[in-house]
Image: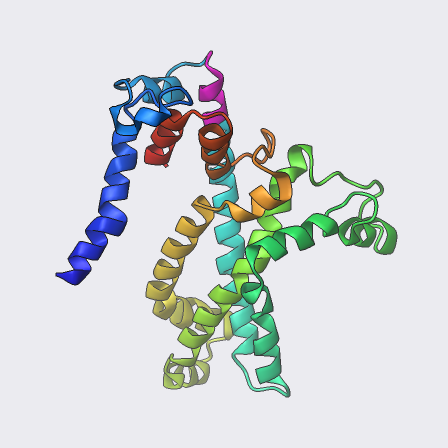
């Protein structure tokens, strides 16, 4: 009973309240009325989804597309990189405990610090990223601009992968260490190489773990707010605007609370 009461008060009622407000004409002038604000019906959803000439519609479509791209690459990089690093660290070598501990560092660092750190690293003239790509390695001939324009979405994808990879690595490493060694020994005796052992033993046995991590990281990436907000503010621009930054900007900067509630429900 206490758990049910807690879930109702903390989760269910606020969610229902946000859903109800999405049908209200709630803005700066009607906010004092809150739940008594004028009824708007489906107008908020109509302006979001079905009015091409409405800037709210174009902003939502752009933010939804950016969120999909951001989520795809962040989850792919986090899970793929985490599994690769876990495979490398799932062996006995000198200093392996120290290496595993150091690999957790990005996960421990707060999101605010991660965003500020990478914001300096992405600087076009003095940032270490462009120094490595242009001055030290010569991979690029010109210094790209990362914090404005089409590259700005990658400027938040890379730090997100960097921060989330250690957690996936930790879970994958625990899963790898729980796998029965007898299967690998039998497969090696039968002539299976590293790739076939990975494909037919490691990957199928890790599938439930991959499913759980996929669920958590998709939710985390879809609701990402701290890193883009700290790096770009409440208006990252059309190339890096995510649904969360759109909701916060329209709700608390433009005072379109009904619109923000509608987009929250859609998200």
Q: In front here: 46 or 173?
A: 46
**Colour scheme of this structure image?**
rainbow
- Residue 25 percent location from the top left of the image: 33, 20
Q: Main SS type for the magenta part? A: helix
Outermost front residue: 32
Q: What stretch is highlighted in magenta?
A: 53-61
- Residue 31 percent location from the top left of the image: 36, 26
Residue 55 highlighted magenta (yes or no): yes
Left or right: where 8 falls relative to 140: left
Outermost top residue: 53
Outermost right residue: 135
Q: In which quarter of the image is residue 26?
A: top left
Outermost left residue: 1
Q: Image height check: is 153 above or below 41?
A: below
- Residue 113 percent location from the top left of the image: 62, 56
For image coordinates 60% across by 45% down, the residue present is: 230
For image coordinates 69% across by 48% down, the residue present is: 119
Q: In front here: 78 or 40?
A: 40
Q: Image height check: is 90 above or below 135?
A: below
Q: Image height check: is 165 above or below 45?
A: below
Q: Image height check: is 183 above or below 158?
A: below
Give the total of numbered labels. Answer: 0
For image coordinates 38% across by 79% down, the residue present is: 179
Q: In front here: 168 or 230?
A: 230
Left or right: where 232 falls relative to 180: right
> In this rendering, does residue 10 appear at all?
yes
- Residue 20 percent location from the top left of the image: 25, 30
Q: In front here: 104 or 65?
A: 104
Quadrant in which the C terminus is drawn: top left
> In this rendering, does residue 81 appear at all?
no
């Amino acid at each position: 009973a206490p758990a049910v009461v807690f879930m109702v008060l903390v989760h269910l009622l606020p969610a229902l309240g946000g859903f109800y407000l999405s049908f209200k004409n709630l803005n700066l002038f009607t906010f004092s009325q809150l739940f008594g604000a004028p009824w708007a019906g489906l107008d908020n959803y109509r302006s979001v989804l079905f009015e091409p000439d409405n800037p709210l519609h174009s902003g939502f479509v752009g933010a939804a597309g950016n969120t999909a791209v951001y989520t795809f690459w962040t989850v792919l990089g986090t899970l793929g990189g985490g599994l690769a690093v876990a495979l490398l660290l799932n062996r006995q070598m000198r200093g392996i405990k120290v290496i595993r501990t150091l690999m957790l560092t990005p996960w421990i660092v707060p999101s605010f610090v991660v965003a500020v750190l990478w914001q300096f690293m992405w600087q076009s003239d003095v940032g270490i990223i462009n120094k490595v790509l242009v001055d030290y390695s010569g991979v690029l001939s010109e210094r790209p601009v990362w914090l404005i324009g089409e590259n700005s979405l990658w400027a938040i994808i890379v730090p997100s992968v960097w921060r989330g990879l250690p957690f996936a690595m930790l879970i994958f490493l625990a899963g790898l260490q729980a796998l029965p060694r007898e299967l690998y020994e039998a497969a090696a005796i039968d002539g299976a190489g590293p790739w076939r052992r990975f494909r037919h033993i490691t990957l199928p046995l890790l599938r439930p773990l991959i499913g759980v991590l996929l669920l958590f990281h998709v939710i985390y990436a879809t609701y990402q707010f701290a890193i883009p907000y700290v790096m770009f503010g409440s208006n990252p621009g059309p190339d890096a605007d995510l649904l969360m930054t759109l909701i916060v900007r329209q709700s608390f900067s433009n005072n379109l609370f009904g619109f923000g509630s509608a987009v929250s429900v859609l998200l």
